[in-house]
Image (spheres, grey):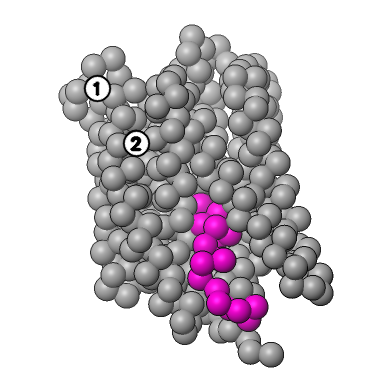
Amino acid sequence: MELTTFWFAVIAFLWTGYFVLEGFDFGVGMLAPALARNEAERKQVLGTIGPVWDGNEVWLITAVGAMFAAFPAWYAGLLSEFYLPIVLVLVGLIVRGVGLEWRGKVRHASDRAWCDLGVLVGSALPAFLWGAIFADLLRSSATAALVGGVFSLSVCVLHGAVFVALKTTGPVRSRARRAAMIASAVALPAAVAALSHIPVAGTAIGAWSAAPWLWAGALAAMAALAAGVALTWRGRDGWAFAATASSIALGAAALFGALWPAPLPGLTVAEAASGPYTLSVLTWIGLVALPFVLGYQAWSYWVFRRRLVAEVS
C-alpha cells in the first residue's frame, strides 16, 4: 500500500472515530434538559459523558493534525472553503466545554441553567454543521448541506439517547428509550435521503455497478440504524448502541470512499500529499503513538463502564 493511500485510510479512521464517539456526546448534551426532571437526574445524564467527553475530542484534533501533516493542500482547501462553519464548530465546542466544566462549580440554579444552555447549543452546532460541511463537500449545494445537517443532528440525538439508556437506570433510562424512538422518526428518513446520495456523489452515474462498495456501505449503514431502533424498542441497550455506532462508522466509510481519490474538487490525494520523507516519518510516529492512544481510551471506557444512578441529595 502506498503511503498516500495508507494515510488517507488513517485520516478516514480518525474522523470515523470522532463521529462515533462525539456523536453520542453531542446527543447527550442536547437531550439532557429533556431527559432530566431535577438536578440529580441532570447530573446522572451528564455523568454518562463526564469522564470521556474531552478525550473524545482528541479524535478531532488528531484527525485535523494528520490532515495538516500528510495532506496540507487538502487541509488548507477544506478549512478555507468552509471557514465560517468550521469557526462556528469551534465556538460550539468551546461553549460546550465551558458549560460542562463550570456547571459543577457554580452554586446558583440560574448559573447552572446558563451552563446547560451552553452545553445544548454547543452540542447542536457541531452536530449539525459537520453533516452540512461534508454533504456540501460531496454535492456542492445548499439543499445537500441542509439534508446532511439534519441527518447528522438527528442521528446524534438518537445515538445519544441509546447511550444514555445504556448507561443509566430508573426513570432516565425509560425516558432515553422513548427519546430514541421519537428521534428515529426523523433520523431514519434523513438517513435514507443523505446516505443514498453518497454513492451517487462518488460516481458519475451513481449505478450499483459503478460503485458497489459505496452502495453496500450506505445500505449497511441504513440497515444498522434501523436495527438500532428495533433493538432499543426491545430493550437491548448494548446491542442497540453497537448498531447505531456501526451505522455511523459505515456511513463515514462510505463518505470517505466517495471522497477517494479526490477529497476536494480538482484536487487528488496524490496532489494534496506531503513528500515521501514526511509521510515516512509520520508513519513511524503513528505506528508508535497510535496504539498507546487507543489503549488508553479503551481502558478509560472500561473503567467507567457501569450504569449511573441518580443521587438524591
Q: What residue do we see at 69% from left, 90% from top?
A: 313
**Which element type, helix, strand or loop, lies under badge 2?**
helix
Residue 38 shown in magenta: yes
The reply to whether discs 2 and 1 touch (Cβ–Cβ < 8 Å) is no
In the image, 288 versus 252, the foreground residue is 252
x and y, in percent, of residue 269 in the image: 51, 18
The span picked out in magenta is 22-41
Cα distance, mark 2 to mark 1?
Answer: 14 Å
Percent position of residue 163, x then y: 47, 66
Residue 223 vs 149, above or below: the answer is: below
Q: Residue at x 50, y 18 (%)?
A: 264
Question: Dot 2: within a 10 Å radius of its alpha carbon, few (fewer than 14), some, or many (20 or more) residues?
Answer: many
In this rendering, does residue 248 appear at all? yes
Residue type at mark 2: give it. Answer: Ala
**Residue 198 placement: quadrant:** top left
Q: Is residue 204 left or right of residue 312?
A: left
The circle drawn on residue 301 is none
Left or right, 93 with reference to 191: right
Looking at the image, residue 17 sits to the left or right of residue 285; the answer is: left
- Can residue 282 be seen from the camera position used here? no
The residue tagged 2 is: 194
Most frequent secondary structure within the magenta stretch: helix
Which residue lies under the disc numbered 1?
A: 206
